[in-house]
Image (tube, grey):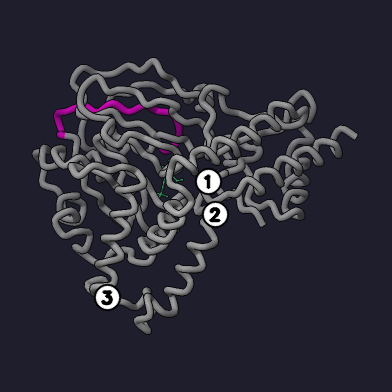
């Protein structure tokens, strides 16, 4: 089976096997990782190792802290402005999709927001590069990869003032980025680096402690930095799944090697869509994501009143070949193939063959 889910998503089999084994016996302790105190030495060491893997794979400099938290990326949407945006200050938000909008909505609770771009009227099918930036913004917020619309920033915009903050939930460790170009990098782990239950926030040390408001203890990033991610009971198992996934990635050859494969997989799928008479990709070519590939039926070939039934037929056709979770997001419709790090080339080839065979059936 190949699983094309947008998240929670496919993870490396090796990581899943190691995590499963740890559920019975963690590192020959005789105790399940699920039952082990987060204050114990083995868990402490595992957290330190996970941070080391992240630092090495992403090239995170020493002047950045790493925070592991539960609550999902949606909690970070509000924690970030709470910690970085003063009541009388302004943050720039580039609205390139639903997740960017959700982040923006939370920021408005804490300070002023300037909308740097908004491509909603084009169903977020492209990334606007001509941004309307404010002179004195505390930061510029972007969604590095738009999971629903299948667009990504190919190169990152420079803030006019303040720092760049990026939600990398759906392209965490999928491609090389220069951490020093960002003040804050954050995301949920359940797509490329772990299961649901943990988020990662990478914060340049000098940026914290600048807002005037009182921040509740648990929502203050400084709390978790000071307590080395052990202020309260952290999501230990999700961090362990991350640890194993990062170990796998390191053995694979790191971000450079996975980016090469990701680009090859994406190129194969996009060229099949471009050559297809029945299917068509929805994202602007120059902004295409290498992680999420939404596509629909070509309206000139499949009549609107036939599309729903044919879509069901295609999903069944794909499922019978072991290709699962290809249904598109309701706001774009059609189909979406998420081809994260752990999706092998064979999975993408199987999808391309499936598209071709279905097309023959439709055109016959
Ligand atoms: N940001 C992006 C880019 C996402 O794709 C998602 C979920 O799909 C989220 C944020 C929300 O993450 P969570 O469900 O962890 O709150």
Using the image, tell me which numbered label, if any, was put on residue 340. 1
Ligand 1's image quarter is top left
The residue sitting at the bottom extreme is: 30
Figure quadrant of the N terminus: bottom right
Residue at point 86%, 39% (across, down): 361
97 with respect to 343 (left or right): left
Crowd class of label 1 (few under 14; some 14 to 19; many from 20; radius 10 Å): many
Q: Quadrant of residue 329?
A: top right
Give the mark nearer the N terminus: 3 vs 2.
2
Q: Quadrant of residue 88?
A: top left
Residue at point 28%, 18% (across, down): 133
Give the mark nearer the N terminus: 1 vs 3.
3
Q: Which residues are magenta?
A: 86-99
Give coordinates of residue 330: x percent, y percent: 58, 40
Mark 1 and mark 3: Cα distance apart in space: 32 Å
Residue behind mark 2? 10
Using the image, tell me which numbered label, if any, was put on residue 37. 3
């Amino acid at each position: 089976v190949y699983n094309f889910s947008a998240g929670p998503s496919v993870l490396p089999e090796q990581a899943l096997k190691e995590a499963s084994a740890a559920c019975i016996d963690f590192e020959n302790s005789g105790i399940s990782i699920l039952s082990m105190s987060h204050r114990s030495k083995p868990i402490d060491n595992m957290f330190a190792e996970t941070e080391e893997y992240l630092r090495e794979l992403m090239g995170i400099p020493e002047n950045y802290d790493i925070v592991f938290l539960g609550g999902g990326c949606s909690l970070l949407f509000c924690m970030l402005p709470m910690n970085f945006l003063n009541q009388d200050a302004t943050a720039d938000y580039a609205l390139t999709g639903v997740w960017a909008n959700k982040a923006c909505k939370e920021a408005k609770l804490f300070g002023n927001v300037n909308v740097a771009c908004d491509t909603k009227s084009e169903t977020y099918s492209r990334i606007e590069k001509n941004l309307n930036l404010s002179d004195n913004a505390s930061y510029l917020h972007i969604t590095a990869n738009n999971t629903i619309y299948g667009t990504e920033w190919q190169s990152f915009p420079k803030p006019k003032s303040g720092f760049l903050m990026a939600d990398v939930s759906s392209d965490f460790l999928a491609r090389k980025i220069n951490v020093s170009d960002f003040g804050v990098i954050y995301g949920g782990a359940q797509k490329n680096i772990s299961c649901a239950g943990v988020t990662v926030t990478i914060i340049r040390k000098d940026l914290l402690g600048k807002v005037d408001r009182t921040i509740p203890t648990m929502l203050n990033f400084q709390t978790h930095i000071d307590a080395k991610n052990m202020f309260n009971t952290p999501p230990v198992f999700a961090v362990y799944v991350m640890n194993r996934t990062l170990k796998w990635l390191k053995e694979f050859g790191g971000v450079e090697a996975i980016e090469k494969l990701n680009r090859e997989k994406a190129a194969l799928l996009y060229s099949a869509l471009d050559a297809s008479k029945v299917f068509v990709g929805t994202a602007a070519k120059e902004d295409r994501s290498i992680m999420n590939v939404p596509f629909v039926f070509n309206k000139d070939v499949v009549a609107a009143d036939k599309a729903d039934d044919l879509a069901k037929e295609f999903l069944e056709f794909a499922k019978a070949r072991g290709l699962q979770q290809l249904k598109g997001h309701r706001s774009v419709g059609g189909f979406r193939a998420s081809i994260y790090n752990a999706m092998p080339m064979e999975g993408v080839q199987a999808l391309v063959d499936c598209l071709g065979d279905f097309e023959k059936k439709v055109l016959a």
